[in-house]
Image (spheres, rainbow, N blue to C red):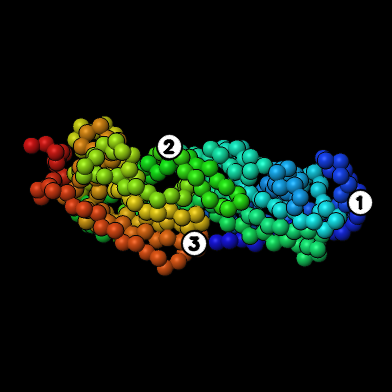
């Protein structure tokens, strides 16, 4: 969803010297100000959440030397003002504004204020620490002092949410974490044309929970509002069949799960595992676009996916003799109707009779 914001000044005339010693008239009435919005953490930006943002400006006759750089504007009621004041050129020439949030420090990247390219952006691997990155570009001059210059902000990352459900009454599924495995993790952003240049590094993004969620027929939201904010890209799926340990770093989604039968027998983690929960994964090959929200709803009714490729044993093998299916709901930061239904492949396993409550069975044991 795009948000519209405004910049306004009042007219007055004065004189000042430019860096090249030419004389330029400037507007020294009320300083440049904005109406805008911004959010932090892995939460989408909304109008009411923004407390500050940053702006770099260029004059029409000096496109390689900024008029001002990374100027912070902070909320004061319904408007945002900078501590250090700047004004429109009084000769009527244009200023071009590049606005963004959050700060370079929070983004963990460097912005070249001459080229307006941000280099080295990489989302935090802890999903709960990720931020929503928004930008806007606009041009204005003295004629805009009354009505203001319109800024139209847009989200520059893809938002990822994971939900899960199960209508299987034979098994109990308890989820205690989510993982988004091996998308490209670093890129450069060009403010002038709003494009990304991807690097080659990949990462695993993760979030675990204090309390497990037991799956029901109705899909459960697993991320407690901390949705992932990741670089837009075409994912290359993990080749589960031919590359079980994922040496090629294909993309996948994994959940930290405990599976028991209705009678209480432990099915997963497998016998010999020391942890109470283990990761279950599925390959994904979605094309993530900037400004869209992707809701993956994992359906455990007919299976439990594959052992996570990072596991020390049985990596890439089916957890149950069945399949996970999932649906992808793609949103333009507000819901649209584009859905993708994807069926995961079955494993070539013999049918295993579910154990009763007195058994502790390892399906891989002869």
Q: Which mark lies nearer to you, 3 or 1?
A: 1
Which residue is at 77% across, 65% downward?
Answer: 147
Decide which of 274, 97 is in the foreground and name it.
97
Q: Is residue 210 in sight in this rendering?
A: no
Image quadrant assignment for residue 17? top right
Which residue is at 51% across, 60% downward?
Answer: 333
- Marks 2 and 1, the one that precedes in the sequence: 1
Return the residue at label 3: 332
Q: Between marks 3 and 1, how big is the CA–CA gap?
A: 45 Å
Q: Residue 309 at x, y = what percent?
A: 28, 38
Return the residue at label 1: 14
Q: Are marks 2 and 1 in contact (CB under 8 Å)?
A: no
Q: Is residue 103 left or right of residue 336?
A: right
Q: Secondary structure at mark 2?
A: loop
Return the residue at label 2: 201
Given the current orientation, which residue lies at the most extreme bottom position? 337
Q: Are marks 3 and 2 in contact (CB under 8 Å)?
A: no
Q: Is residue 145 left or right of residue 236?
A: right
Which residue is at 46% across, 61% downward?
Answer: 331
Which numbered circle lies on residue 227? Answer: none
Q: Between marks 3 and 2, how big is the CA–CA gap?
A: 27 Å
- Marks 3 and 2, the one that precedes in the sequence: 2
- Marks 3 and 1, the one that precedes in the sequence: 1
Decide which of 67, 135 is in the foreground and name it.
67
């Amino acid at each position: 969803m795009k948000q519209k914001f405004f910049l306004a000044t009042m007219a007055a005339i004065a004189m000042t010297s430019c860096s090249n010693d030419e004389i330029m008239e400037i507007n020294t009435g009320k300083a440049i100000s904005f109406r805008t919005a911004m959010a932090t953490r892995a939460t989408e930006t909304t109008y009411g959440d923004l407390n500050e943002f940053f702006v770099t400006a260029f004059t029409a006759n000096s496109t390689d030397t900024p008029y001002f750089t990374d100027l912070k504007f902070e909320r004061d009621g319904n408007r945002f003002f900078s501590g250090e004041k700047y004004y429109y050129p009084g000769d009527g020439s244009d200023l071009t504004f590049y606005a963004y949030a959050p700060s370079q420090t929070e983004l963990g990247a460097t912005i070249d204020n001459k080229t307006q390219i941000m280099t080295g952006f990489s989302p935090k691997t802890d999903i709960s620490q990720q931020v929503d990155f928004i930008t806007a570009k606009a041009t204005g001059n003295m004629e805009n002092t009354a009505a203001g210059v319109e800024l139209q902000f847009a989200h520059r990352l893809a938002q990822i949410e994971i939900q899960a459900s199960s209508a299987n009454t034979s098994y109990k599924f308890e989820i205690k974490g989510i993982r988004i495995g091996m998308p490209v993790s670093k890129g450069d952003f060009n403010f002038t044309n709003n494009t990304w240049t991807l690097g080659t590094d990949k990462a695993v993004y993760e979030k675990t929970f204090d309390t497990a969620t037991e799956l029901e027929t109705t899909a459960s939201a697993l991320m407690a509002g901390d949705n992932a904010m990741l670089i837009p890209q075409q994912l290359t799926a993990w080749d589960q069949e031919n590359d079980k340990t994922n040496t090629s770093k294909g993309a996948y989604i994994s959940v930290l799960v405990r599976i028991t039968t209705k009678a209480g027998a432990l099915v997963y983690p497998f016998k010999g595992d020391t942890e109470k929960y283990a990761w279950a994964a599925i390959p994904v090959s979605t094309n993530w676009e900037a400004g869209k929200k992707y809701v993956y709803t994992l359906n455990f009714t007919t299976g439990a996916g594959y052992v996570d490729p990072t596991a020390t044993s049985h990596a890439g093998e089916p957890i149950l003799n069945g399949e996970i299916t999932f649906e992808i709901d793609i949103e333009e930061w507000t819901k649209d109707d584009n859905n993708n239904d994807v069926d995961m492949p079955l494993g070539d396993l013999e049918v295993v009779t579910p154990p009763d409550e007195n058994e502790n069975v390892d399906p891989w044991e002869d």
